[in-house]
Image (cartoon, helix red, strand yellow):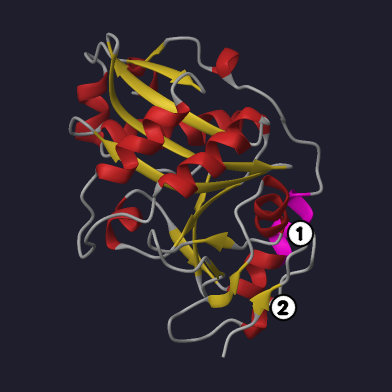
């Protein structure tokens, strides 16, 4: 049996080492998706992941997949293509739209989505409070790619990304990494290992080391509030 969270959203989560090996990282269940609960979870590197209509499940996998913000890789061929790309980058201008696009994007080996209405409402509220952010890729006024996640201190927890047009998610990830690197934020959490993320430069980190790293980063001064002014229609070609 896994622990069931109490009603109090500020109540501590179980120690990470109590997470199951199979399924990897399942730590506890229950609670809610209120902003205090979510911020409490992310502060400790814990995230919710469950199917709509099922109990809320909380995870801390071992190992953890992460990007170093100075090490996201785009192939030389892709970078050359970006030199002639007319798309633009924005931040926090279409957060809910990015989430909805992520929800309907097909995922290899997955049927349906974990981004149901409850998740959408919860993260839109975090966005309203200045803790959740999105990077968007636009072709004119058409959203063609994006990524969203949660920022605490100098740590960014990536949640999901999508490509409406080929390359859109890579561009959003690269733009996020460049923005965070310029601020001195060293890590982007990518949660669970996948071959695709490895091709973009992600690496695995033992949970014990990950927990130590984020314990420092989440306590450092961050950026609460909108990131709109950080990417005011910047050209994608600048990533080349």
Q: Tell me if residue 238 comes above or below residue 41 in the rendering.
A: above
Lower sequence index among marks 1 and 2: 2
Tag 2, which secondary structure? loop
Q: Is residue 16 left or right of residue 160?
A: right
Is the Cβ of the residue at disc 1 closer than 8 Å to that at disc 2?
Answer: no
Q: Is residue 116 left or right of residue 153?
A: left
Q: Is residue 6 left or right of residue 163?
A: right
229 is within the stretch colored magenta:
no
Which x, y percent locates residue 45?
Answer: 64, 61
Which x, y percent locates residue 232?
Answer: 50, 10
Residue 76 image-quadrant placement: top left
Q: Is residue 209 visible?
A: yes
The structure residue drawn at horizontal position 44% and vertical position 30%, both measured from the top left corner, is 96
Q: Tell me if residue 83 comes above or below residue 61 in the rendering.
A: above
Magenta stretch in the rendered image: 212-218
Res 87 label = none
The residue that mark 1 highlights is: 215
């Amino acid at each position: 049996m896994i622990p069931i969270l109490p009603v109090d959203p500020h109540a501590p989560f179980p120690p990470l080492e109590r997470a199951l090996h199979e399924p990897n990282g399942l730590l506890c269940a229950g609670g809610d998706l209120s902003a205090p609960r979510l911020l409490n979870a992310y502060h400790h590197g814990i995230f919710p992941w469950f199917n709509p209509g099922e109990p809320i499940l909380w995870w801390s996998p071992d190992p953890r997949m992460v990007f170093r913000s100075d090490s996201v890789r785009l192939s030389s061929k892709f970078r050359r293509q970006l030199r002639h790309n007319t798309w633009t980058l924005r931040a926090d201008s279409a957060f809910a739209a990015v989430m909805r696009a992520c929800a309907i994007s097909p995922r290899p080996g997955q049927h349906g989505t974990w981004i149901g209405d409850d998740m959408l409402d919860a993260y839109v509220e975090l966005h309203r409070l200045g803790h959740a952010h999105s990077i968007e890729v636009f072709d004119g006024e058409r959203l063609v790619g994006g990524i969203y996640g949660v920022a605490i201190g100098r740590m960014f927890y990536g949640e999901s990304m999508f490509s409406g047009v080929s390359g859109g998610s890579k561009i959003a990830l690269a733009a996020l990494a460049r923005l965070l690197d310029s601020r001195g934020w060293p890590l982007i959490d990518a949660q669970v290992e996948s071959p695709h993320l490895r091709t973009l430069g992600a690496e695995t980190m033992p949970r014990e080391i990950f927990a130590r790293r984020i314990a420092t980063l989440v306590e450092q001064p961050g950026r609460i509030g909108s990131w709109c002014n950080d990417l005011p229609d910047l050209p994608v070609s600048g990533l080349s």
